[in-house]
Amino acid sequence: DTGVSQDPRHKITKRGQNVTFRCDPISEHNRLYWYRQTLGQGPEFLTYFQNEAQLEKSRLLSDRFSAERPKGSFSTLEIQRTEQGDSAMYLCASSFTSGRTGEQYFGPGTRLTVT
Amino acid sequence: QQPVQSPQAVILREGEDAVINCSSSKALYSVHWYRQKHGEAPIFLMILLKGGEQKGHDKISASFNEKKQQSSLYLTASQLSYSGTYFCGTERLSQGNLIFGKGTKLSVKP
């Protein structure tokens, strides 16, 4: 068990560019979550998958954000036409859920800076 | 529907006790507690389900009062390693997503 991994760990991009982040969950986990965290705040829910199905997406999430989890394994989060307000830590978490929500294991995050 | 945590920050001396509260205005199915150290990912502590259960391990325990929709995290005989920001995450429906509070920053001094 190598834990949840995320790539890249840091990303600096210019406003208007597209960025894509990857998350590899713990292998036996069926759920994968994406969160965004800014300084002094708790993780803000973005979306989650159960296996390959995207079950919920935050209403606050702009249509510039899209996530996929092909084959129910790794996931990607893409942000199109980045804005300075997108600068944040993007966290991925995974859990095994059967009957009720299990504990979530977080990855180290990808820190995005939009200049 | 973001849960409200109190206090926002607390400073303790080693060996002192602390209580962190998490309140919701909506009916909850469960409350999850996490601790995050600066520059690191949140680490899971425990889950409390509706029904008023209480859990604990080592010197950290928690309770969930279903009538008040409030959970409390108890840290007894605090250690330096307890320093960090504590977040509660609330779940309104079984197998739903978590909504996290703004966190409580705990600093334990020698």
Image: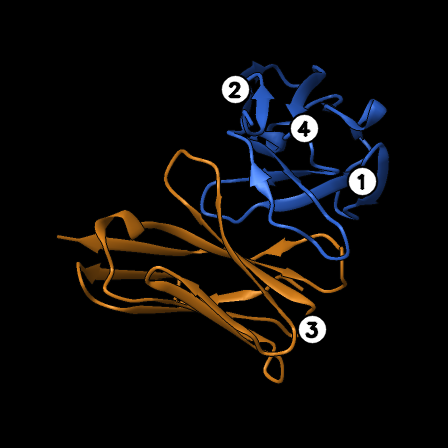
Chain colours: A blue, B orange
Q: Are marks 3 and 2 on the same chain?
A: no
Image position, residue A105 (x, y; %): 57, 40
Mark 2 neighbour density, 10 Å: few (under 14) some (14–19) many (20 or more): some
- The residue under label 3 is B26
- The residue under label 1 is A50
- Tags 4 and 1 touching, CB below 8 Å: no
Front residue of B22/A59: it is B22
Q: Is residue B21 visible?
A: no
- Tags 4 and 2 touching, CB below 8 Å: no
Could you tell me how far apart the alpha carbons at marks 3 and 2 are, in whole angstroms?
Answer: 36 Å
Q: Are marks 3 and 4 on the same chain?
A: no
Q: Are marks 3 and 1 on the same chain?
A: no
- The residue under label 2 is A9
Q: Amino acid at mark 1?
A: Gln
Mark 4 neighbour density, 10 Å: few (under 14) some (14–19) many (20 or more): some
Q: Is residue A61 above or below residue A74?
A: below
Q: Is residue B25 visible?
A: yes
Which chain letter matches label 2? A
Could you tell me how far apart the alpha carbons at marks 4 and 1 are, in whole angstroms?
Answer: 13 Å
Q: Amino acid at mark 3?
A: Lys
Which chain letter matches label 4? A
Image position, residue B42 (x, y; %): 48, 43
User: Which disc number belongs to residue A27?
Assistant: 4
Which is closer to the viewer, label 4 or label 1? Answer: 4
> In the visual, does B85 lie left or right of B3?
left
SS at circle 2: loop
Q: Is residue A45 above or below residue B58?
A: above
